[in-house]
Image: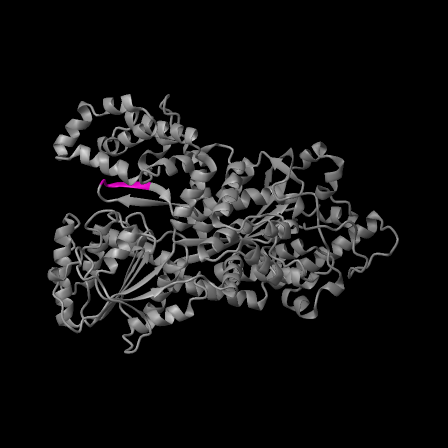
């Protein structure tokens, strides 16, 4: 019964039936009877294959995946394979890539699952043979078997059947491995391989109502409607249990560089796909009670480890630097590292505050410009050191909402260094920074005498929440006991951090630009994770035209290419790449706004760019809403905007104010937003909107005190600024014993660029 329900067929670009099918049709125009017999023979073959059950290699991979799932509680990968004809489902695939899959990816993350969609709109190189094309499709389904046992499989069906390979297109080994059925399309074979032959409960079939065809211009009708009699007969074998949806003709658009039919009213389709796969994934990977039993400290460590695993995968072209850091961690006697002499008069990391000895270890610093791969390098260092059996403590600033808190860092570090339960109590969450620094000295002294070996790795210390204060990095020892080693990274553009690090003798690794080959390899690896591939000429064009020189820029470009839906126009897309990161981001921002039908994305970007330290996340719906009417932004609009902007924004925690803020994850994006949208007059209006929120809607006095005067000043509302310094705020300040004038001066002076 189940297999009868999954008798389906589809796929691309055939205008007539191939002449040399196994059940051969004569060169004359075939009759309805001929075609019906041919289809019947094909489905008899499919029935026999299904009765045999899964191929042996499928059974083996499914069992391996099942055993792996039982044996480990680590993060798992979920792959969703998308199967359809291409040009006639351009709009649906755009909705999937830009709306459905981002939502599913976010939902999966909360379940300790990493979602990867396999959307092969341009996963096949342009010079690939027919054999290579079909192998790419089937082998991508094999990867889904390897990851999930029973593939998560999405099939989209319209009124086209698609390209039917000839017998000569199918090599003997492919024929035998996959039990290839002559006379069916590639998409039909995908369905047989990924769903039908294993009675796959994770397969979904979506049938599009053809009523919109009547509105299509004649020139575009052939893209959507099938003209082959054989194909029409095949399309009678639809599943009995499927999802039906409607679409409307919305004209044509040139987003990819050539005219493409735009289908609209696809919200129901998006909702149905999302709900089906949430249920299927939840059934395949039920939530474990363990996640609810973790302490906050364990959850923080686990989230940081996931971040490290993700970043470690992106490291390319830093073999020499990685070897140097591993040698440092292993205490190799001769190290070819740059020597930092230190300052004659250290003022913050004072030697007198620490119990130091002559043979103590120097710290190792990794410095570079933003986006040049410091985080990926340190992530790979941590990963490799753990695999080599080292005891490693890691803290990656920016990896979680609370990771920017210097107090959070100190508490985690004390817990990691403390062996005695009495020492572990020193990481009191209520302790002040000065108290925690004293506790750190205590546990370091204990480590010196007990000989506990450990590698300490701190990434992005320039991003700690107190990075503009006098006490920034005052907790970092000038040197460490012989059994401890410490690697620290920082952005060389943040002079306060670099000055603190260079107060004492140390060794240093400075990262330069990646070479051309490494950048091309980085692009290939990134795209390969999503089943996509550029040929050598295209990779060379990407590097040469863009003049890219750092990993962050390359990955942003690859993400933009990944969601580009028209491979025919890929060469044109590559040739038009801007030659600076700032110009590329402006192009990216233009696309984001073009695709945003709520206005929420521009509002988020502009308000974030005008804010002091970000937008308070607890109040984001109010800030993005209609402030004069006190009407919040719809939750759905913000959820969609947040998912689209996820590669470019992050949430940080300000421990001083016990508040989380949404901000940019890279200074370059902040600059691009200001260049693209924030002319003086418009900037004034955004500051006024924030001032209105803090004065008339925000109930949190601490936020009002810190942010309202700044935005009133920037909006040119001086009279309102003086009125804002009235009784309620001053009362709160008096209760907190807070120097208001000093606060305002420091805030305004610090953010004059806004």
Of 12 and 331, nearer the camera is: 331
Residue 286 included in the magenta stretch of the image: no
> Is any atom of residue 529 visible in this view?
yes
On screen, residue 661 versus residue 527, left or right, reads left
Residue 476: x and y in percent read 20, 59
Q: Residue 309 lies in what quarter of the image?
A: bottom left
Which residue occupies the extreme bottom position in the image?
333
On screen, residue 454 versus residue 145, left or right, reads left
Image quadrant for the C terminus? top left
Of 609 and 630, nearer the camera is: 609
| Magenta residues, start to end | 657-661
Residue 416: x and y in percent read 21, 61
Which residue occupies the extreme right position in the image?
28
Main SS type for the magenta part? strand
Residue 290: x and y in percent read 31, 55
On screen, residue 237 versus residue 97, left or right, reads right
What sort of colour scheme is used for the picture?
Answer: one colour
Of 516 and 189, nearer the camera is: 516
Residue 338: x and y in percent read 31, 69
Q: Residue 368 lies in what quarter of the image?
A: bottom left
> Is any atom of residue 241 visible in this view?
no
Residue drawn 51% across and 52% down? 557
The image shows a total of numbered marks equal to 0
Of 595 and 618, nearer the camera is: 595
Residue drawn 37% across and 32% down? 621
State whether residue 529 is above or below residue 333.
Answer: above
On screen, residue 219 versus residue 193, left or right, reads right
Residue 659 included in the magenta stretch of the image: yes
């Amino acid at each position: 019964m189940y297999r009868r329900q999954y008798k389906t067929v589809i796929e691309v670009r055939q205008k007539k039936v191939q002449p040399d099918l196994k059940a051969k049709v004569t060169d004359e125009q075939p009759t309805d009877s001929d075609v019906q017999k041919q289809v019947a023979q094909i489905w008899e073959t499919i029935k026999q294959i299904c009765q045999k059950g899964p191929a042996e290699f499928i059974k083996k991979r499914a069992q391996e995946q099942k055993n792996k799932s039982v044996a480990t509680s680590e993060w798992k990968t979920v792959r969703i394979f998308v199967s359809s004809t291409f040009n006639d489902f351009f709009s649906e695939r755009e909705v999937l890539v830009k709306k459905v899959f981002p939502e599913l990816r976010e939902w999966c993350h909360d379940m300790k699952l990493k979602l990867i969609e396999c959307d092969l709109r341009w996963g096949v190189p342009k010079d690939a043979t027919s054999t290579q094309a079909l192998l790419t499709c089937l082998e991508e389904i094999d990867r889904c078997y390897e990851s999930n046992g029973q593939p998560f499989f999405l099939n989209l069906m319209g009124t086209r059947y698609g390209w039917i390979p000839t017998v000569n297109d199918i090599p003997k080994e492919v024929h035998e491995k996959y039990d290839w059925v002559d006379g069916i399309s590639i998409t039909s074979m995908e369905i047989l391989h990924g769903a039908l032959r294993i009675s796959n409960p994770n397969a979904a079939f979506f049938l599009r109502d053809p009523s919109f065809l009547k509105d299509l211009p004649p020139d575009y009708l052939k893209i959507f409607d099938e003209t082959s009699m054989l194909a029409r007969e095949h399309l009678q074998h639809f599943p009995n249990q499927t999802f039906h949806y409607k679409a409307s003709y919305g004209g044509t658009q040139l987003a990819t560089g050539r005219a493409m039919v735009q289908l609209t009213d696809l919200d129901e389709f998006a909702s149905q796909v999302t709900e089906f796969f949430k249920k299927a994934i939840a059934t395949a990977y039920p939530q474990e009670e363990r996640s609810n039993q973790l302490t906050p400290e364990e959850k923080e460590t686990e989230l940081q480890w996931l971040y490290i695993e993700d970043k470690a995968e992106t490291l390319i072209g830093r073999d020499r630097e990685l070897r140097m850091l591993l040698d440092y961690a292993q205490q190799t006697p001769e190290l070819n590292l740059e020597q930092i002499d230190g300052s004659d008069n250290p003022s913050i990391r004072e030697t007198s505050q620490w119990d130091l000895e002559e043979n103590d270890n120097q710290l190792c610093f990794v410095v570079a410009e933003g986006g040049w791969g410091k985080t990926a390098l340190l992530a790979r260092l941590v990963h490799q050191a753990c695999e080599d059996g080292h005891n490693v403590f890691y803290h990656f600033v920016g990896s979680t909402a609370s990771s920017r808190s210097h107090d959070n860092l100190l508490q985690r570090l004390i817990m990691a260094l403390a062996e005695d339960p009495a020492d572990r109590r020193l990481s009191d969450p209520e302790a002040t920074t000065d108290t925690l620094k004293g506790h750190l000295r205590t546990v370091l002294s204990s480590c010196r005498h007990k000989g506990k070996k450990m590698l300490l790795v701190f990434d992005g210390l320039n991003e700690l929440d107190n990075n503009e204060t006098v006490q920034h990095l005052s907790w970092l020892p000038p040197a460490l006991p012989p059994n401890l080693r410490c690697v620290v990274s920082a952005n060389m553009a943040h002079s306060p951090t670099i000055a603190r690090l260079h107060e004492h003798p140390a060794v240093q690794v400075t990262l330069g630009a990646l070479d051309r080959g490494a950048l091309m390899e980085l692009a290939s690896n990134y795209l390969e994770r999503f089943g996509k591939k550029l040929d050598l000429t295209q990779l060379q064009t990407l590097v040469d035209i863009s003049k890219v020189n750092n990993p962050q820029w390359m990955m942003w470009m690859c993400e933009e290419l990944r969601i580009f839906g028209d491979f025919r126009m890929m060469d044109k897309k590559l040739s038009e790449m801007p030659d600076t990161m700032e110009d590329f981001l402006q192009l990216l921002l233009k696309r984001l706004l073009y695709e945003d039908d709520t206005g929420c994305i521009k509002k988020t970007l502009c308000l974030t760019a005008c804010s002091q330290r970000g937008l308070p996340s607890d109040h984001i719906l109010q800030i993005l809403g209609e402030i004069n009417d006190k009407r919040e932004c719809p939750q759905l609009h913000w959820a969609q905007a947040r998912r689209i902007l996820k590669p470019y924004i992050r949430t940080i925690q300000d421990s001083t104010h016990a508040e989380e803020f949404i901000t940019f994850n890279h200074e370059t994006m902040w600059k691009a937003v200001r260049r693209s949208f924030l002319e003086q007059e418009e900037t004034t209006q955004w500051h006024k909107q924030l001032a209105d929120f803090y004065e008339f809607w925000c109930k949190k006095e601490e936020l009002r005190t810190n942010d309202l005067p700044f935005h009133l000043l920037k909006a040119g509302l001086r009279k309102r600024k003086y009125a804002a310094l009235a009784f309620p705020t001053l009362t709160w300040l008096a209760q907190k014993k807070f120097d208001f004038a000093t606060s305002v001066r420091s805030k305004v002076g610090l953010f004059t660029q806004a």
